[in-house]
Image (spheres, rainbow, N blue to C red):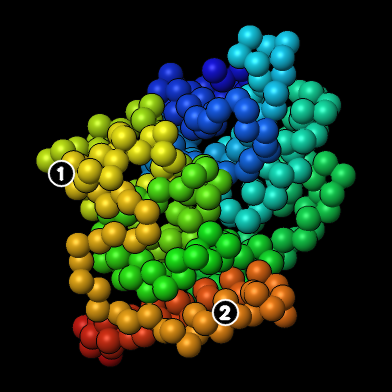
Amino acid sequence: MLQLLYPHVSFSSSERAAISFSSMPDSTIYELCDSVYTFNFRVDPVRLGLPKDRIFLHGYVFFRQKRDPLMRRGGFQRSVVIITHLPYHGLFSRLAHILGPLYFDLGTTILEAAAHNVTSWPQPGAGQAYELPFLGSALAVELPGRDANQLLETSRFPIDRFRDTLDDLWACWELMILGEPLVVLADSPARCSDAIVGLVDIIYPIRYCGDWRPYFTIQDPDLRAIVSKSHVPPNTVVGVTPANESALGGSSGSTGWPVKQGLQTRRRCAVSRDRTFAEGLLKGLRSGRQTPWAVNNALRRHFMDLTVQFLAPLDRYFSTLIPM
């Protein structure tokens, strides 16, 4: 149930339902945890005063769950969500990490202070660096240029989520380039949403223009449009947890979705993995000589170069179509 919006936004009933269900992950009350993850949900941009092509908003969730014998279910579950149209995953994940604990300690008054801080920020500009005040912290943020990769500590490629399946990334890159549908099954919303964000980012500088849902639930209003026994929509990437796996056909594959542990695909991939590079990354992580964000940057640079190589013959062809 959506209890409070600050500042108030006139979301429709379906938009409110999408926010509510996506913000409360299915889990047992005996798991005591704080968790941060992200989801996308469809909106009516005209009614909300957004550009017509902005049909999705991003939600960044701080979810808290703990045992409380005084409550009927024996536990406490609540989320704080930051909703934005801006595609800055690293920044808004950090904001959720800061805002969530303060909200549970201080109550709703902290939301007004957070909103006041955000409204004081300058308009974001590509390639610009900022120091942004937020609830007693000063966040050093550098936004990537329009044609530049973001090789910073705020890099959004989550190497930890792919550590055990690093060899599969080259096949994932190929599937993303080709617009093949993908499902990521993980044991928590945080893991599946991080993986989806990483997959969307892996084909940079190509912008992924399909439908991508970092965390998708069976209560999502778009369920019937995405899940069908007769049709698998192309250019669709979704993240699910076991509680929602059955909606996508589970391991039986009745919907045609490849929802199994590890990478499962019917496509015979043409791109070979770089074993030497992958082993070097893992060795650097195990030894502790390289920080995770530095390994992230090396991995993103590798796949960015791969994408540039893929685009090179296309660039040469299209350049011949432009009159001199």
| In the displayed structure image, the side of residue 93 where residue 104 appears, left or right | right
Q: Is residue 24 above or below residue 271?
A: above
Q: Is residue 191 above or below residue 276?
A: above
At a point 41% along the width and 39% down the height, the residue shown is 242
Q: Position of residue 77 (x, y in %)?
A: 63, 24
Q: Distance of mark 1 from mark 2, alpha carbons?
A: 38 Å
**SS of the residue at dot 1?**
loop
| In the displayed structure image, the side of residue 98 where residue 294 appears, left or right | left
Q: Which residue is nearer to you in this view: 23 or 159?
A: 159
At a point 65% along the width and 16% down the height, the residue shown is 74
Q: Amino acid at mark 1?
A: His
Residue that label 1 marks? 231
At a point 43% along the width and 60% down the height, the residue shown is 200
Which quadrant of the structure image shows residue 56? top left
Which quadrant of the structure image shows residue 216? top left
Say which quadrant the N terminus sits in. top right
Q: Amino acid at mark 2?
A: Leu
Residue that label 2 marks? 281
Q: Is residue 80 above or below residue 143?
A: above
